[in-house]
Image (spheres, rainbow, N blue to C red):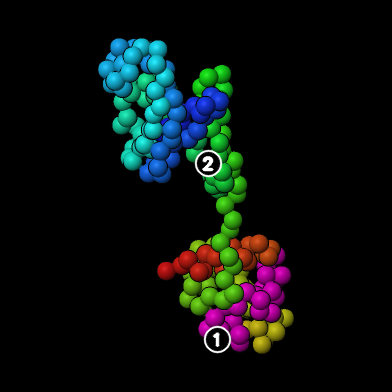
Amino acid sequence: MIVLALPDADGAPVELVPGRGFTSYSVLVQTQADAEETGATLGDVVDYQVTHPPGAVEDYDAARLAHFRIQKVTVIDPPEGQRERSHTIADVNGVFTYAPVFEAIPAPPVPASVPRLNGMLALDAAGMIPQIEAYMALPETPSVHKIYWRDLAVFHRDSELIAVIAAALNVSSNQIDNLFRAAAAAT
């Protein structure tokens, strides 16, 4: 993606935001074409209002942009797992440069509960069902856990059964959270 920026009265770059009004600035009439376009004479200073571009800036004529001292600035895409929090346009040796500030994309919330079917699909995708079944088949596994596992209609994140199975299989709290997120998204 490309954005447009132009220098303000102090020469600092100002981003033109599509569809958000206009920017006013002054230009010295330096060519006969400028004079004909503005109705001014060579050497005059003309005030302009540049309407912010309504569409794709890639389509703007480079000569026209240069006439208004507008530069195309390439937007930097965020790294995987991050999003842009804010950005500025900086003047680096006369070239306007996109300077973003990225932040990590927060993980989706962990659902408090998921239907058994969704939970089983997430466990299957993680390859954990054989391990859980092996744990349930152990003679030392309390019978109440076996009954709950067999007849459970909804998996609750804070249930004792989930905590016991996780401990038995050496599954971290973060892994459980991710399983519940996956279960919520399962179809």
Counting the numbered discs, the total is 2
Name the one closer to the observer, 143 or 187. Answer: 187
Q: For mark 1, give the secondary structure.
A: helix
On residue 68, the disc is none
Residue 127 visible to an observer of this rendering: no
In the picture, the quarter occupied by the C terminus is bottom left
Question: For the point 39% across and 29% down, which residue is it?
Answer: 48
Callout 1, which amino acid?
Asp
Q: Position of residue 96 (x, y in %)?
A: 51, 26
In the picture, the quarter occupied by the N terminus is top left
Callout 2, which amino acid?
Pro
The residue segment tinted magenta is 147-170
Query: Of circles 2 and 1, which is in front?
Result: 2
Q: For mark 2, give the secondary structure.
A: loop
- What residue is pinned by disc 2? 78
Secondary structure mostly seen in magenta is helix
Q: Is residue 185 above or below residue 138?
A: above
Question: For the point 49% across and 72% down, which residue is it?
Answer: 118
Question: For the point 59% across and 41% down, which residue is it?
Answer: 101
Question: For the point 43% across and 35% down, which residue is it?
Answer: 23
Q: Are marks 2 and 1 in contact (CB under 8 Å)?
A: no
- What residue is pinned by disc 1? 151
**Is residue 158 a member of the stretch shown in magenta?**
yes
Label 1 packing within 10 angstroms: few (<14), some (14-19), many (20+): few
Q: Rounded to the nearest whole Å, what is the CA distance between mark 2 and mark 1?
A: 45 Å
Q: Is residue 151 above or below residue 120?
A: below
Residue 153 visible to an observer of this rendering: yes
Q: Position of residue 92 (x, y in %)?
A: 57, 23
Name the one closer to the observer, 23 or 98. Answer: 23
Q: Is residue 73 above or below residue 123?
A: above
Q: Is residue 141 above or below residue 182?
A: below
Q: Position of residue 107 (x, y in %)?
A: 58, 58
